[in-house]
Amino acid sequence: MTPLSRREALRLAVSAGVTARFGRLDRFFTQGRPVPRASQLAWQQDELAIFIHFGVNTFTNREWGDGTESPAIFNPTRLDAGQWARTARAAGFRAMVLTAKHHDGFCLWPTKTTRHSVANSPFRGGRGDVVREFVDACRAENLKVGLYCSPWDRNAPAYGDSPRYNDLFCDQLSELLTQYGPIHEVWFDGANGEGPNGRRQEYDWPRFWAHVRGLQPDAVMFSDAGPDIRWIGNERGVAGDTNWSTVDPSVVPIPGMSGDAVMKMLQDGDPRGSVWRPGETDVSIRPGWFHHPAEDARVKSVDELVELYFTSVGRNSKLLLNVPPTREGLLHAVDVARLTGMRGRLDAMFSSEATAGAMASWQAGTGGGTLEVTLPQPATVSVLEAREDITRGQVVSRHGFEGLGSAGWIALGRGTTIGYRRLHRVPPVEVRALRLTIEDALAAPVGVSLRAWRG
Ligand code: FUL
């Protein structure tokens, strides 16, 4: 027998631990297939969330702080979380996720666990709480609340002293998850740098996950390894062209793992996966995650943002778009203008539905079937949508669109998975009927739907 590598042994041990201590909550099935829990379904239906990277890095102009920053530098003079929330809401986003603590360990709330926090900064005279202002602003705009809390902490002296630091981290989670009302998403980054004197911190992921579940049972937890939502495997904003919402948890049992099999599982998911763990696509509107004045001229264009929508939401994923506040504590005017532009473009694209009121018929066939829709009147379409009823699981593995034009049926677009929502942009074409053929599926497809817009 080949001896297991350390990593493999850890993977199996953690996987066993996760199943033993966590598995019961991690699996929901319908007819033998994993299906989403209510919180996962709601998370997916929100489609768009804003990521807010804000902290000492905003003031040092860095991406990763080293934990030696003085809290005295944190001094946003015009912080207005209401401006973040109003911008998000107006642009059609339905949730926001704030970096309550990044790798530098600086806490944006007045924690009792460390002096490295807003309580020792000039912000609001040392009586400020960015997490509180953020949560209140989300509630005022009817946005779901998400919090990012980095396990990697370059300031905490206990980091690297594994059990002691894990206690401290759980204490921080307790504060965040008991003092601010309902939290919808808890965002874990897998980064696991060295502690003081090169000590290695072993995170107790099963404990962290169980702790969050105990305090906020309706929150979804994000990390490479879920347990509820998985990372999509890149920070470019591109979900897998094939994107199953199910995964094999033994391939990615803990966050921070690398390797081709891990990346493939994150990108594509696994049609035979035993757990429902849809992918979240995180990407920044700028080159960096934190605001850097030098990048004000490098904000993604409206075209690029619209494209991100199609490569994330349009591929059975959710878009978590990072828009970092400036040192003043406001979203930059350029970023706001791009978000407004993105919303305007998407609203225009989806304003005129060619399939509204159309007659549809389903014809079952080998391996799938065909949904045919006759349009009330001929229309020039350029955006096509397919959906599965994911409350029954995800089954479609190959699909194709055709349109009936003056020269008969022509192929318009093809793809693999559908899932919650699959969008295709096609060159404008006049059609009087549309067909969505399910060419291959794991089981008889249920609740498949088809829509098209003039775009
Ligand atoms: C990464 C972090 O290291 C980045 O700073 C950022 O927070 C990103 C969302 O996750 O792994």
Image (cartoon, rainbow, N blue to C red):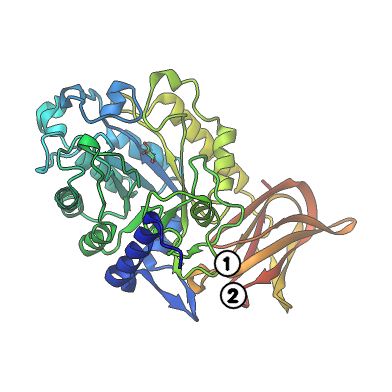
Snapshot quadrant of residue 159: top left
Across and down, in percent, residue 370 comes to: 72, 71
Label 1, residues with CA under 10 Å away: few <14, some 14-19, many ≥20: many
Q: Secondary structure at mark 2?
A: loop
Label 2, residues with CA under 10 Å away: few <14, some 14-19, many ≥20: some
- Asked if residue 297 shows in the view, the reply is yes
The vertical placement of 426 against 114, above or below, is below
Single out the residue that lies furthest toward the front: 1
Nearest to N terminus: mark 2 or mark 1: 1
Across and down, in percent, residue 269 comes to: 52, 60
- Asked if residue 154 shows in the view, the reply is no
Count of numbered badges drawn on the protein: 2
Q: Residue at x 46, y 61 (%)?
A: 251
Mark 2 is on which residue type? Val
Q: What residue is shown with label 1?
A: 388
Across and down, in percent, residue 305 comes to: 54, 37
Horizontally, residue 8 falls left or right of residue 432, namely left
State the residue in front, 4 or 308: 4
Mark 1 sits near ligand 1, with its Cβ under 8 Å away: no
Q: What residue is shown with label 2?
A: 446
Report the image quarter containing ligand 1: top left
Which label was assigned to residue 154?
none
